[in-house]
Amino acid sequence: MEIAEIFKAVRARRLFATAVVLIAVIAAVGIKLSSHSVDTGTATAQLLVDSPQSVLGDLQQDPTPLATRASVFAQVMASTEVLESIAHVTGIPASEITAQGPFSGAGLALNVVTPSEPRGSQLRAQGIPYRLTFVAQATLPIVTVSAQAPTPAAAARLADAVAGGTNQFINTLQSQTQTQPSKRVIIRELGPAQDSTVNSSSALVMMVAAFAAILILGLVLLLALERRDRRARRKIELELGEQLEMYDAPAAR
């Protein structure tokens, strides 16, 4: 399909082309007016799985065992007991918090394919307003916390509470097992959570898609009409040519 043919068809049917554009604009505006934009807050924090002496301040300590343990904690943080501790720190009901951790291996990416059984739990939890995701780094004793809440401030508060809530759980476990103080694990937050606002509305994408779809459909229809008329004109020209030849033949004799 040549560009020149398209422009020629548009010029030949200006009213039709204008009507198509107006319909596309009206459809896009209608989608915009009928859609509702919902802003949600997100926040990210970095947690260090550390020892009482801290691997950051002691060159003689090997961080490798803690890096391996970080992948375990990334899953433990998504457990019901830890979520209850986090809920206690924040004051948010535990029933309004859901969490997701890695399901196998260390350092899984956020876009990893989730198995069907955990995915079913995720679908059931979609209506819960407070969400946490935990991802362990592959070679570092660090767990990345991603929080989602109705507002950025609430998301930051939720992300910041993970360290305190997890330490409460660990302290209780260490007291029950009488772990020596020098061998205990400590979760340290590496600075306050960084929050931002996310617009969850897809109105803009739907507007562009509707406008483009109607415009393309109208253009295809315009070209089809133009080609039909061209074939009709060509047929009339051929018929007239044949009639002229029939009249010219006796005159020539």
Image (cartoon, rainbow, N blue to C red):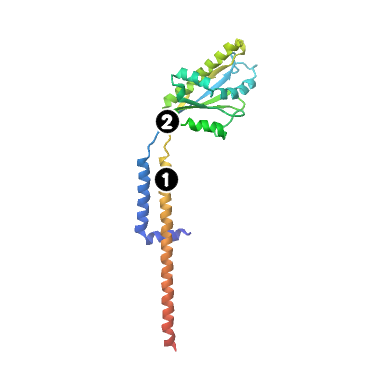
Q: Residue at point 52% right, 30% down?
A: 121
Q: In which quarter of the image is the C terminus?
A: bottom left
Q: Residue at point 43% right, 70% down?
A: 234
* Numbered circle sitting on residue 87: none
Which of marks 2 and 1 precedes in the sequence?
Answer: 2
Which residue is more in the foreground, 77 or 154? 77
Where is residue 199 drawn, in percent x and y? 42, 34
Which residue is more in the foreground, 164 or 98? 98
* Mark 2 Cα-neighbour bin, 10 Å: few <14, some 14–19, many ≥20: some
Where is residue 172 drawn, in percent x and y? 55, 13
SS of the residue under disc 2 = strand
Residue wearing tag 2? 40
Q: What residue type is labelled 1?
A: Val
In the displayed structure, would residue 180 be above or below residue 163? above
* Mark 1 Cα-neighbour bin, 10 Å: few <14, some 14–19, many ≥20: some
In the displayed structure, would residue 104 be above or below residue 186? below
In three-dimensional space, the C-alpha distance between marks 1 and 2, rounded to whole angstroms, equals: 23 Å
Where is residue 53 drawn, in percent x and y? 59, 13
Question: Is any part of residue 124 visible from this angle?
Answer: yes
In the displayed structure, would residue 247 be above or below residue 24? below
Q: In which quarter of the image is residue 75?
A: top right
SS of the residue under disc 1 = helix
Question: Is any part of residue 190 visible from this angle?
Answer: no
Residue wearing tag 1? 208
Q: Which amino acid does label 2 sit on?
A: Thr
Outermost residue to the bottom: 253
Disc 1 and disc 2 in contact, CB within 8 angstroms: no
Where is residue 8 drawn, in percent x and y? 41, 61
Mark count: 2
